[in-house]
């Protein structure tokens, strides 16, 4: 029986680092929208769009 393909741990680490960098870059926008996010109990469409459009996003 063949074992499932797995990615190299370094690849996962690089991907995680990239994700963390993208989220850090979006922190000001996320903070700006935090009050509305709390009121509406959902992430604002502006934040969702920024996350989706971020370089390296797979969404």
Image (cartoon, rainbow, N blue to C red):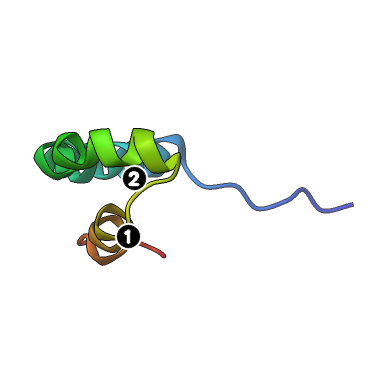
Q: Residue 53 location, x and y as percent?
A: 25, 66
Quarter of image, res 19: top left
Q: Residues within 10 Å of mark 1 (few under 14, many from 20)?
A: few
Q: Residue furthest front?
A: 39
Q: Quadrant of the C terminus?
A: bottom left
| Residue drawn at point x = 90 percent, y = 52 percent | 1
Tell me, yes or no, whether the two marked residues, 1 and 2, touch with CB atoms within 8 Å.
no
Q: Residues within 10 Å of mark 2 (few under 14, many from 20)?
A: few
Q: Residue 3 location, x and y as percent?
A: 77, 48
Quarter of image, res 51: bottom left
Q: Secondary structure at mark 1?
A: helix
Query: Would you place residue 58 above or below residue 12 in this image?
Result: below
Q: How many numbered circles does the render carry?
A: 2
| Residue drawn at point x = 14 percent, y = 39 percent | 32
Closest to the observer, 38 or 11:
38
Q: Residue 4 location, x and y as percent?
A: 73, 51
Query: Which numbered marker is on residue 15?
Result: 2
Closest to the observer, 38 or 53:
38
Q: Secondary structure at mark 2?
A: helix
| Residue drawn at point x = 21 percent, y = 40 percent | 30
Q: Residue 39 location, x and y as percent?
A: 37, 36
Q: Which is more foreground, mark 1 or mark 2?
A: 1
Q: Earlier in the sequence, mark 1 or mark 2?
A: 2
* Left or right of 44 in this view: 28: left
Closest to the observer, 14 or 27:
27
Distance from label 1 to label 2 (Cα)? 25 Å
Quarter of image, res 56: bottom left
* Left or right of 29 in this view: 42: right
| Residue drawn at point x = 24 percent, y = 44 percent | 18
Residue that carries the numbered disc 1 in the rendered image: 45
């Amino acid at each position: 029986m063949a074992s499932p393909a797995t990615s190299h741990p370094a690849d996962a680490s690089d991907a995680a680092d990239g994700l963390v960098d993208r989220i850090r870059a979006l922190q000001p926008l996320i903070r700006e929208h935090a009050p509305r996010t709390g009121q509406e109990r959902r992430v604002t469409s502006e934040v969702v769009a920024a996350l989706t459009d971020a370089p390296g996003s797979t969404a």
